[in-house]
Amino acid sequence: MNLATSVTTVVVTAVPLLLLATLGFWLALRQDEVRWLRDKRADLYIDLLIEGYAEHNWVREELTAMEIREISDENGTDYDAGRRAEDDWRDRIGRLTDTRLPTSERALLGARMSAFATVEVRRLFNAIGACSPLPPPARGQATALKVRLALAWEALDGGVSADLQRS
């Protein structure tokens, strides 16, 4: 066996091994990137569901208070009596703790959502905020907004679950 045959044998053996090692490393790196993104997205979706639920509760409470004022107005009671009825209702159920995030943390959540959430989940999360009673809805619209709010929450919950199952 001469030198040329030995070199050829080494090259023919080494090149596929190097290619396989490089390909294996690249695939492992890609798998790690996918796992990292899936973990980031799962953490984000947990935070989105927590904030979405907090917004849902706050909006529902505010819309219920508006409904009580409207009912009081329709019954011919004055504004103060409507406020007293609303306060009485809030005292009976107990004031819900506002668990929504502070402004800076909410902005950070929005930035994380822009970076990692799918377009569909972003749309579903923003649908909850679209039900906000600020500015106050037209007279008689609070109940319709509560229905939209409940549907938006259900859609977000289902959308997040579906997106996590796909990834």
Image: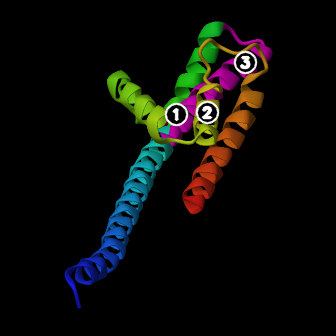
Provide the secondary structure element on which disc 1 rests.
helix
Q: Residues within 10 Å of mark 3 (few under 14, many from 20)?
A: some
Mark 1: amino acid: Glu
The relative height of residue 36 versus residue 106 in the rendered view (above or below) is below
The reply to whether callout 2 and callout 1 are in contact (CB within 8 Å) is yes
Q: Is residue 54 magenta?
A: yes
Q: Nearer the viewer, residue 4 or 19?
A: 4
Provide the secondary structure element on which disc 3 rests.
helix
The relative height of residue 163 versus residue 151 in the rendered view (above or below) is below
Residue found 59% across the figure and 10% down from its top: 80
Query: Disc 2 and disc 3: Cα gap in Å?
Result: 23 Å
Which quarter shows the N terminus? bottom left
Q: Which residues are magenta?
A: 52-78
In which image quadrant can residue 67 be found? top right
Mark found first going from the N terminus, 2 or 3 = 3
Residue found 63% across the figure and 43% down from its top: 153
Foreground: disc 2 or disc 3: 2
The residue pinned by badge 2 equals 128
Mark 2: amino acid: Ile
Mark 3: amino acid: Glu
The residue pinned by badge 3 equals 70
The spot of residue 17 in percent (x, y) is 32, 76
The spot of residue 45 in percent (x, y) is 48, 48
Q: What numbered label is drawn on residue 55?
A: 1
Q: Nearer the viewer, residue 120 or 82?
A: 120
Q: Residues within 10 Å of mark 1 (few under 14, many from 20)?
A: many
Foreground: disc 2 or disc 1: 2
